[in-house]
Image: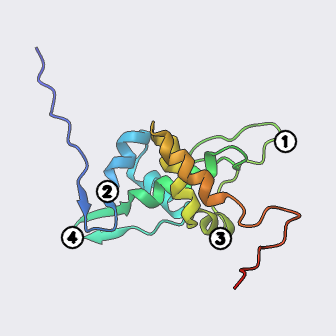
């Protein structure tokens, strides 16, 4: 029998603002080289954090940007080292624009992500209430009578 080396899990840190994950996470999950993982962070406009000899990135930020890229109507994304679709009908992007980053920063994106990952229907109801217009079309706001 051959002895396999134990799988080393990437380090995670949490300073209260979300998880910082070692770049080795992307290397393992995406099955890419460290160089490609760092290039991926660069085109997603996620700046790494260097602590000692280790490199970390914000996992919540990564997830938010990927959510915006892959949700219905999103542009999609070609990771570095990957081939994109060959047809001209696809508008898959290779680098994230400032507009996409602004979209990912909106609070509604977090609400969408919560609804998708939750089985609680109350979350969906809260999201619908949040997006409900304050004054229905065609009706002026009611004036308070004194």
Q: Is residue 100 above or below residue 116?
A: below
Mark 4 or mark 2, whichever is nearer to me: 2
Left or right side of 43 for 118: left
- Few, some or many residues within 10 Å of mark 2 (<14, 14–19, 20+): many
Write down the residue under mark 4. 52
Taking the spot 60% from the left edge, 66% from the top edge, the residue there is 101
Q: Residue furthest top?
A: 1
Left or right side of 141 for 68: left
Q: Position of residue 43 (x, y in %)?
A: 57, 61
Which of 47/116 is in front?
116
Number of numbered discs present? 4
- Few, some or many residues within 10 Å of mark 1 (<14, 14–19, 20+): few
Q: Can residue 78 be seen in this view?
A: yes
Write down the residue under mark 1. 88
SS state under label 2: strand
Q: Residue furthest right?
A: 138
SS state under label 1: loop
Q: Where is residue 46 in the image (x, y as percent from the top left)?
A: 48, 65
Q: Determine whether label 1 and label 4 are within 8 Å by CB.
A: no
Mark 1 or mark 3, whichever is nearer to me: 3
Q: Determine whether label 1 and label 2 are within 8 Å by CB.
A: no
Q: Determine whether label 3 and label 2 are within 8 Å by CB.
A: no
Write down the residue under mark 3. 98
Q: Where is residue 136 in the image (x, y as percent from the top left)?
A: 79, 61
Measure the alpha-carbon separation of dots 3 and 4.
30 Å
Write down the residue under mark 2. 21
């Amino acid at each position: 029998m051959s002895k396999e080396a134990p799988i080393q899990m990437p380090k995670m840190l949490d300073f209260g603002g979300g998880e910082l994950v070692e770049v080795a996470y992307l290397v393992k999950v995406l099955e890419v080289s460290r160089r490609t993982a760092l290039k991926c962070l660069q085109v997603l406009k996620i700046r790494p954090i260097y602590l000692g000899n280790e490199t970390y990135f914000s996992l919540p930020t990564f997830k938010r940007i990927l959510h915006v890229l892959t949700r219905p109507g999103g542009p999609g994304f070609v990771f570095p080292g990957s081939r994109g679709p060959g047809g001209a009908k696809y508008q898959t992007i290779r680098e994230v624009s400032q507009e996409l980053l602004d979209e990912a920063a909106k609070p509604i994106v977090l609400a969408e992500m919560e609804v998708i990952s939750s089985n609680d229907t109350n979350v969906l109801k809260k999201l619908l209430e949040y997006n409900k217009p304050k004054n229905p079309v065609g009706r002026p706001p009611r004036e308070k009578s004194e």
